[in-house]
Image: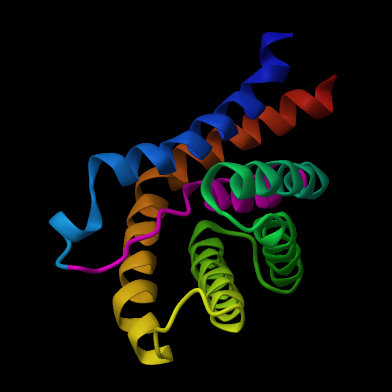
Amino acid sequence: MISRLLLPFMTLLFFYSESLFVHLFPSEKWFDQKMIVPHFLILVLFFICAYFQYRTALVYGFIFGFLFDIYYTEINGIYLVLFPFVIFLSHQMMKVLHNNLFVLGIISLVNVSVLEFLVYQINLIIKRTDFTFMQFVDWRLWPTLALNALFYLIFAFPLKSFLQKKRKDWLDD
C-alpha cells in the first residue's frame, strides 16, 4: 500500500518544492531582476512519461495542472490544459527520438520553453503583461531554462532509477 502512494507523494513534494524555491530564493534579490520560474513538477511529469507510464503522467498532468491553477494562478484552466499538452508533446517526441537522459533533457527544455511561451502568449492576449517578446526571452525564458536545466542535471539519475524500479515493480504485480 505504501509503495503505491510513493509516486503521488513524490509528485506532490515536487509540486510544493516550486513554492518553497520561490520563497527561499526570491529572484529580484538573488538574480538581478530576472524572473526565474521553477518547473520542477513538469520535469518530474516528463520523467514519469518517459520511464514509468504515459497515461499516469497525463492523469497527473490534469490533476496537478488543476492544483497549479488553484494554488499559483488567478486564471483557472491555463495549466490544466497546458500540462497535459506538453506531456503529450514529450510523449510524441520520445516516440521518434531515442529515450535516453540526454535526449529527454533536450525534450524537457524544449517543452518547458513551449509551456513558458504559451503562458506568455495567453497573458499577452488578456493584457496581464506588457513585456515585449525580447524582454520575455531575456528576463524570463533564459533564466527559467537555466534553473530547470540545473534541476534536471541534479535529479535525472535518481528519478530515472526510481521510476524504472517503480515500473518494474508495477509490471511484476
Q: Nearer the viewer, residue 98 or 65?
A: 65
In the rendered view, tell whether residue 148 sits above or below residue 53. below
In the rendered view, tell whether residue 148 sits above or below residue 140. above
Residues shaded magenta: 33-53
**Which residue is painted at 83% across and 46% down in the image?**
55
* Direction from residue 60 to residue 105 in the image, left or right: left
> For the C terminus, which image quadrant?
top right
Q: Nearer the viewer, residue 165 or 135?
A: 135
* Direction from residue 46 to residue 32 in the image, left or right: left
**Which residue is painted at 61% across and 76% down in the image?**
122
- Residue 2 magenta-drawn? no
Q: Residue 87: x, y in percent? A: 70, 59
- Residue 36 magenta-drawn? yes
Q: Nearer the viewer, residue 19 or 44?
A: 19
Q: Residue 139: x, y in percent? A: 30, 76
**Which residue is painted at 58% across and 69% down in the image?**
115
In the rendered view, tell whether residue 127 sits above or below residue 154. below
